[in-house]
Image (spheres, helix red, strand yellow):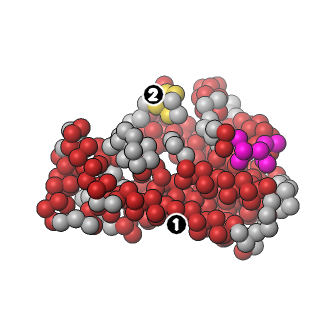
Amino acid sequence: MKIVAQIKEPVAQEMELFESKFRESMTSKVALLNRITHYIVNRKGKQMRPMFVFLTAKLLNNGEVNERTYRGASVIELIHTATLVHDDVVDESNKRRGFFSINALWKNKIAVLVGDYLLSKGLLLSIDNGDFDLLRIISVAVREMSEGELLQIEKARRLDITEDVYYDIIRQKTATLIAACCGLGACSVKPESDDVETFRKFGELCGMAFQIKDDLFDYGNERIGKPTGIDIKEQKMTLPLIYALNHCSKKEKSWVINSIKNHNKNKTRVKEVIAFVKAKGGLDYAVATMLAYRDEALSLLQTYPESEYRSALELMVNYVVERDK
């Protein structure tokens, strides 16, 4: 958490003010809703997304942010929270960040309605203030996230994902929201400038690296440690696995696919699949790909003058690939 505190330092004041604005943006006349949103706000994560918004805006605007920046950060957080609430329903997950999920405490029907409420709050925050450029950025992200999830579900049934399809899925599922954060930050202070697209791309590259890092956790912490195999149990096609399947014999391929489809609850078999992926160089390939995304993101930042905001964003990119959870 020390690195996260370092990243947050240049925007600590903005993040504090954002907290209160964000709470405000969630309020409702319905007591049940307020109870649930209070529960959500008090169990927040590291808040990397608003940090991306503020750091980008300050980097481009001589250390200054404006009301649009705060609204952009609130919209992102409202929409992100809505997607998490809905995800927990879809995944039938009872835990979120170590606490009970909304659906575990209040059941699915209420969780879906709360997600819808947060989504509409986010959209209205932009509409009521005429931030249509910001609304476009976030709406594209929501559309892509839904498409990415559905594409993954469609392909997972057949276990025939190519590397290109995998990149499409993670770009839409994960990277698009981080891309939107950086694009929003830029657009809030420099609307219609080339910086909006540059930072959208920067966020996308960070998001790609972030998701590949998540894939690697399934094979144990870094390249040693205890493998988890959760993605294999859930029949998710990740980059190390796709690489291994593309670099093995027909016989090995049918064994792996059979293991994932029919023996994914068998701990020994899952361990054997993990060992196979490692032996075929799947992990090394995924690490190299992740670092290539990181380097491309860092090179985009090099075109901007040095500042504490640029340094914090560089730290953020490195944190994405070096984190241990």
Circle 2: element type: helix
Q: Nearer the viewer, residue 318 or 152?
A: 318
Task: Classify mark 2: residues with Cα within 10 Å, few (<14), some (14-19) or many (20+).
Answer: some
- Coordinates of residue 82 in the picture (x, y in percent): 56, 43
Query: Does the magenta portion include 221?
Result: no
- Coordinates of residue 166 in the picture (x, y in percent): 39, 63
Circle 1: element type: helix
Q: Nearer the viewer, residue 256 or 22?
A: 256
Is residue 303 placed above or below 291 in the rendered structure?
below
User: Image point 67% across, 39% down: which residue?
Assistant: 2
Q: Is residue 15 left or right of residue 292?
A: right
Does any portion of residue 131 appear in the rendered image? no
Query: Does the magenta portion include 6?
Result: yes
Mark 2 residue type: Ala
Q: Is residue 165 left or right of residue 56?
A: left
Q: Nearer the viewer, residue 102 or 100?
A: 100
Residue at image mark 2: 104
Residue at image mark 1: 292
Numbered mark located on residue 167 in the image = none
Residue 94 occupies quadrant: top left
Q: Is residue 291 left or right of residue 301?
A: left
Q: Nearer the viewer, residue 272 or 52?
A: 272
Q: CA distance from mark 2 to mark 1?
A: 39 Å
